[in-house]
Image (cartoon, helix red, strand yellow):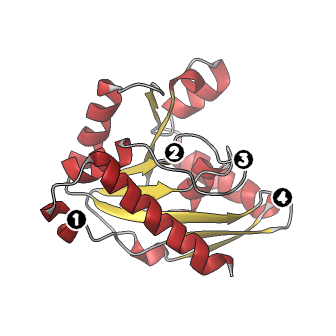
Amino acid sequence: MLYPLGKFLVSVLFKVLFKIKVIGKENIPKDGPVIICSNHISNYDPPTVGITSPRTIHFMAKEELFEKKGIGFILRNVNAFPVKRGMRDRNALRKGLKLLEEGNVLGLFPEGTRSKTGQVKRGLAGAGFFAMRSNATVIPCAIIGKYERSKPLTVIYGKPIEFESLKKDKPSAQEVTDEIMENIKRLLDEYRK
């Protein structure tokens, strides 16, 4: 796998290009299944979350990217797996659950696509599905700033989301996703000041 080498190379490159500050890394459990859910503002978000997390992350990525020779090769070798957008992709859901059952970290951008305005959009139900169908700890993540040379960029990992009271009401996957997105919004509001 190219993950350790890729993480090292991207870390070096991003340290040269951007002024990345990381807050709350200690909120990510050292072991056991974890879902990291982040807002999505740029194509650089997955490598940014990947290099700032202390654990290896398995990202879902849109299927079309795997069809491109160069990027497809890289994605397959840095623990990413494809998802068909705009439909319920049972294979991707099974793959994500299997990774969590094995105690891995699953990286998701619940909005499904980048926000051009920087405002958080409503997330897709997939994040809630994984949260409800697994025993994973869900960590909200907020990326604040712009990917511009020498400009500050902050990555915040929030405290694990508490779902116990919500689970008693037997919520839908969408309702759980909405709760995850609210936690991301709170991080953005708190640290944008």
Q: Residues within 10 Å of mark 3 (few under 14, many from 20)?
A: few
Residue drawn at (48%, 73%) of the image:
25
Asked if the residue at tag 4 contacts the one at tag 3, i.e. Cβ–Cβ closer than 8 Å, the answer is no
* Tag shown at residue 116: 3
Image quarter (top left, top right, bottom left or bottom right) of the C terminus: bottom right
Asked if the residue at tag 2 contacts the one at tag 1, i.e. Cβ–Cβ closer than 8 Å, the answer is no
Q: Secondary structure at mark 3?
A: loop
Front label number (1 vs 4): 1
Q: Secondary structure at mark 1?
A: helix
Residue 179 place in picture, x, y as percent: 37, 62
Does residue 52 sit above or below 130 in this rendering? below
Asked if the residue at tag 3 contacts the one at tag 2, i.e. Cβ–Cβ closer than 8 Å, the answer is no
Give me the C-alpha separation between circle 2 and circle 4.
25 Å
Give me the C-alpha separation between circle 2 and circle 3.
28 Å
* Tag shown at residue 148: 4
Q: Name the amino acid, label 2.
A: Tyr
Front label number (1 vs 2): 1
Identify the mark nearer the N-term, 1 or 3.
Answer: 3
